Structure formats: C-alpha cells, structure tokens
Image (cartoon, helix red, strand yellow):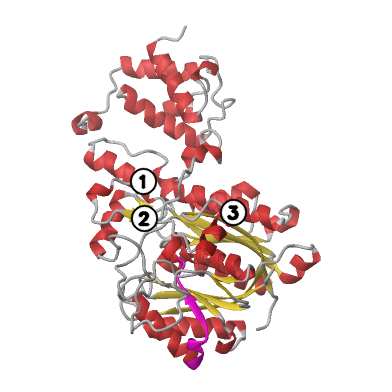
C-alpha cells in the first residue's frame, strides 16, 4: 500500500501522463510508462515544488522505477535538503 | 521565370473562423467575423475586450498523454494545421521524399502564454523555479520541430520570425526552394497564439488595438483585432502533383521582399510597393493581370491608407479594376500566422469563384479609395492574386498566386 509520499508521486505521474493513477504501482517502470526526458524534467520540477527539496542532477539520473523516485525523495526529505532559494523567495 | 512551377496541393487551417478549411470557407463566404469577447485572458485588465480566438480547442483531442503539455498552443495549432494539409494533399510522405521536404514556418512571438506563466511564477508568486519545459515550448521553431517529428521529415526545416510578415516569408522561401530544385515538397505556413496578458498589455500600450472590432479601410476604423491559429500549405512541383493526380488549388507563382529602411513601426508606401513589384516580376506577370489582392489591411489608422497608396502606385489605372479585401476583418491579425491564414483564405475563396469580403466595413474613407469588397463575398472569376504582408521593422513580403477555379 503506497504511503503518503508514494501516493503523491503516483498522482503526479498520472497527471504528467494524463492517465489514471490506479494503473501506476511502485514497481512501474518510468520507461514503460512512456516517461521521456521532457516528462522527467517536469517530474523533477513537480517533486522539488511539492516536497521542498532540491534534487541533485546525479540523483535524478539514477531513477528507473516509481519506487526509485519515492525512495530518493524520502532520502532527500530526511536529509533536510530543502532549497534555501525557494524558502527565502516563497510567497505562497 | 526559370525553374519549376510550384503547385499548392494541400491546405490546413485552424483559426477563429473554424477548425478546418470548410468551416473557414463558410465564414469567408458569409462574411462572418470570428471576433468575440476574450476568453483566454481576463479582459478587465485591458482597455480592449475582443479578440479572434480559436473556439473550443481541446489539446487532448489532438495530442495524447503528456505530449499535449510539451507543446505551447501556437505549436499545437501548427501541427494540427500541418496534419490537415498533408492529409488534404494526399502526398505520399515516405522514403526519399521525406529527406527532400522543406518545413518552413512563420511565428512572431512563439510560446508567449507559456513564457507568461513562467514569469508570473517567478516575479509575482515568488517561486524560485520556472517550469523546465518553458524553453522548448517558448522557442519559435517548436512548431517546425514537432511537424518534422510528426511526419519523419528530415529535410530543411526552419522558422522565420519577421513579425507580421513571418509566414509570407516562410511560404516564399519554401516556394523558391521547390522552384529552384532544392526541394521536392514543402509544408509551409505559420502558427501563432498571442493571447497572454503580458503580450496583450504590450499591444495595448502601442494603441493600435480596436476597442470593438476590426474595420479595415473604413473611415471609422479604430485599429486591429489580434487573432490566433495556424495555416499550412503543402507545396510541390506542378509536374509531380499532376503525375500523381493530386487536387491542385493553384500555384505560388511569385514572391517579393523588401525592407522600408524608414521607421520601426510606421509603414512606408515605397517599401510596400517595392515588395508588390518584386512579387510580380518574380512571377513574370504584369500588374494588369492581377484581379484580387488580399491586403495586409490591419484596420489601423496608418496601414490602410498607406497600403492603398502603394497599390495605386504599383497598379496605376488598373487599381480601379481590381478587388482588394482584408480578411483580417474576420480571422483577426494572426501576426506570424497572418500570411498563411490569408493565403488559405485566398485559395479557398477564389477556387469557389468568390472574392472574400472586408467585413465590418461601414464608411468610405477618401484616403482609402479602392474596391474593398465590403461586407459580402462577391462572385468573380479571378485567376491571379497577390497577398500582402507588411511587418513592424519595415519588412515586407508579398506572394503572388495563380488560382485554379474548381
């Protein structure tokens, strides 16, 4: 059963691909979902905004499955890698 | 002129007058403008309220999944029009032909709405990030790139950005490339979607947008009405079109370009006349052969009398025997798409034996003293036509057509 972080990420992927979230699991492969490089840019942008994290380029390159994304995001949240730029500028 | 004859074998369009050529033709034939209150932008923040918007466009109907989010509205229109034009032409875009097909698009402002959203996020909402697809959606050549991927076309592909002349320049370049033997087919035209608050405020500041509607050449004209959409034409050598039994709307026969070298925004009759003369020379036809001119006809105080003077200068006494109309009165000013929309309006109407009218015409202006086909489409058998585009920057592009009545 996906937890809160996983649920948000699955909803995000569903919105990016305009498909129902019900068809996406933690085991789903991003490539098989048709997530191309442009979709990946959008995903990283949405993740950074949603979870107030900054995803290093190296981390971004290693994601293959939905679970990779979830685990990577959780690690960054735990590390408190919130963006100082974003928090200083945030008005919303 | 030396070189091959260039046929127009496919047309595709989406604009305020309809989402295909038959809808557009019906509106042109009825003299029915597609100008209505703005829906894409909040008009309470503007001094003008009307535009010529594409109605009821759902990108999801045309682009599956995330693809719809990869294209700004102007590029979506461009691809939709290109699909229609290719299908209409029946051209077999396969094998070697795809390597020898040109894609030439015109777009003046590219993905304005996308850029506006990104900058609102940054400057107004205080966000530290701009959406990562901003660059590939904003770039003016996005339409050309997506069209190439759509059809697997690997030949020369480019976008021309010469403000309101963009798509005439694009169609003209494609025409010359086929005529000279550099290419065997072309998808040429333009796309534009200028309805973002930022851009409309910039237009407002120039004080050229009408507070109500667009009345080209009418004494009580109050300015232009912005429009959006895309138009694409399939061009190919006339011999090739005939040998495959293609439907032939007519031919592009000439192309003339000039620069005013005068003023960034004020039009010049000399530059306009020069571009018309060069188009006629390029076509190898005399002025008195022309029966119709699709005018630049923006409906601004400056353009309409200047263009009328330029036409008198080029055509002399024949200016009183030819018809001139501005279809911008119906589909609005499509900026970088204007020339493409107007080329299509010209072929659609003349092929059916009608001159497209200047809608909203109310009052003769002594400074605009030509036959502007006021308000009602007029039956006429016209074979040779010009289509004028005169851009800010003083960059002019005029196409000459030979139409093929049905």
| Image location of residue A41, percent across then percent down | 44, 34
Up-down relation of residue A40 to residue B307 (above or below): above
Q: Is residue A8 magenta?
A: no
State which mark lies toward you, 2 or 3.
2
> Which chain does tag 2 point to?
B
Task: Say which element carries label 1.
Answer: loop
Residue A67 visible here: yes
Task: Say which element carries label 2.
Answer: strand
Up-down relation of residue B218 to residue B114 (above or below): below
Q: Residue at x 71, y 69 (%)?
A: B237
Q: Are marks 1 and 2 in contact (CB under 8 Å)?
A: yes
Considering the image in quadrants, where does the C terminus of chain B appear?
bottom right
Up-down relation of residue B122 to residue A43 (above or below): below
Q: Which comes sooner in the sequence, label 1 or label 3?
A: 1
| Image location of residue B27, percent across then percent down | 51, 59
Q: Nearer the viewer, residue B15 or B171?
A: B15
Q: Which comes sooner in the sequence, label 1 or label 2?
A: 1
Q: Residue at x 55, y 58 (%)?
A: B26
Residue B162 visible here: no
User: In this rendering, would A46 be left or right of A20?
Assistant: left
Q: Which residue is mark 1?
A: B40
Q: Nearer the viewer, residue B121 or B380?
A: B380
Q: For the view shown, which residue lies furthest in the bottom direction?
A: B317
Give the spatial CA distance, label 1 vs label 2: 9 Å
Q: Which residue is mark 3?
A: B82
The residue range painted magenta reads B317-327
Q: Residue at x 33, y 84 (%)?
A: B366
Q: Which residue is mark 2?
A: B51
> Which chain does tag 1 point to?
B
């Amino acid at each position: 059963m996906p937890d809160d972080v996983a649920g948000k990420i699955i909803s995000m992927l569903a919105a990016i691909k305009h498909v129902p979230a019900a068809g996406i699991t933690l085991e789903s492969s991003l490539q098989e979902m048709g997530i191309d490089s442009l979709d990946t840019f959008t995903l990283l942008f949405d993740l950074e905004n949603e979870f107030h994290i900054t995803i290093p380029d190296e981390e971004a390159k290693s994601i293959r499955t939905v679970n990779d994304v979830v685990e990577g995001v959780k690690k960054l949240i735990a590390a408190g890698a919130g963006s100082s730029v974003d928090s200083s500028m945030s008005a919303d | 002129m030396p070189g091959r004859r260039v046929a127009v074998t496919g047309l595709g369009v989406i604009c305020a007058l309809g989402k295909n050529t038959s809808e557009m033709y019906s509106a042109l034939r009825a003299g029915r403008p597609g100008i209505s209150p703005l829906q894409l932008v909040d008009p309470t923040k503007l001094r003008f309220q009307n535009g010529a918007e594409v109605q009821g466009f759902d990108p999801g109907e045309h682009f599956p999944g995330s693809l719809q989010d990869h294209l700004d509205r102007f590029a979506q229109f461009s691809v939709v029009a290109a699909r229609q034009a290719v299908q209409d032409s029946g051209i077999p875009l396969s094998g070697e032909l795809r390597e020898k097909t040109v894609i030439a698009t015109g777009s003046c402002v590219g993905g304005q709405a996308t850029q506006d959203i990104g900058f609102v996020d940054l400057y107004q909402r205080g966000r530290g990030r701009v959406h990562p697809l901003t660059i590939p959606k904003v770039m003016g050549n996005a339409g050309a790139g997506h069209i190439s991927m759509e059809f697997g076309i690997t030949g020369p592909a480019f976008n021309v950005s010469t403000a309101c002349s963009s798509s005439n320049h694009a169609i003209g370049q494609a025409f010359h490339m086929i005529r000279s033997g550099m290419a065997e087919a072309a998808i040429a035209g333009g796309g534009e979607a200028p309805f973002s608050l930022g851009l409309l405020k910039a237009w407002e500041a120039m004080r050229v947008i009408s507070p109500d509607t667009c009345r080209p050449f009418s004494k009580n004209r109050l300015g232009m009405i912005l429009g959006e959409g895309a138009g694409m034409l399939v061009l190919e050598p006339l011999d090739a079109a005939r040998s495959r039994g293609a439907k032939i709307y007519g031919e592009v026969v000439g192309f003339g370009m000039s620069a005013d070298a005068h003023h960034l925004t004020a039009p010049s009759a000399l530059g306009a006349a020069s571009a018309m003369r060069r188009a006629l020379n390029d076509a190898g036809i005399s002025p008195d052969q022309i029966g119709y001119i699709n005018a630049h006809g923006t409906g601004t105080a400056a353009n309409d009398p200047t263009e009328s003077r330029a036409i008198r200068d080029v055509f002399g006494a024949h200016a009183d025997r030819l018809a001139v109309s501005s279809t911008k009165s119906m589909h609005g000013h499509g900026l970088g798409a204007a020339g493409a929309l107007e080329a299509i309006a010209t072929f659609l109407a003349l092929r059916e034996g009608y001159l497209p009218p200047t809608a909203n015409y109310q009052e003769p202006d002594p400074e605009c003293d030509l036959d502007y086909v006021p308000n009602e489409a007029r039956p006429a058998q016209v074979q040779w036509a010009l289509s004028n585009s005169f851009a800010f920057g003083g960059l002019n592009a005029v196409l000459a057509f030979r139409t093929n009545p049905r």
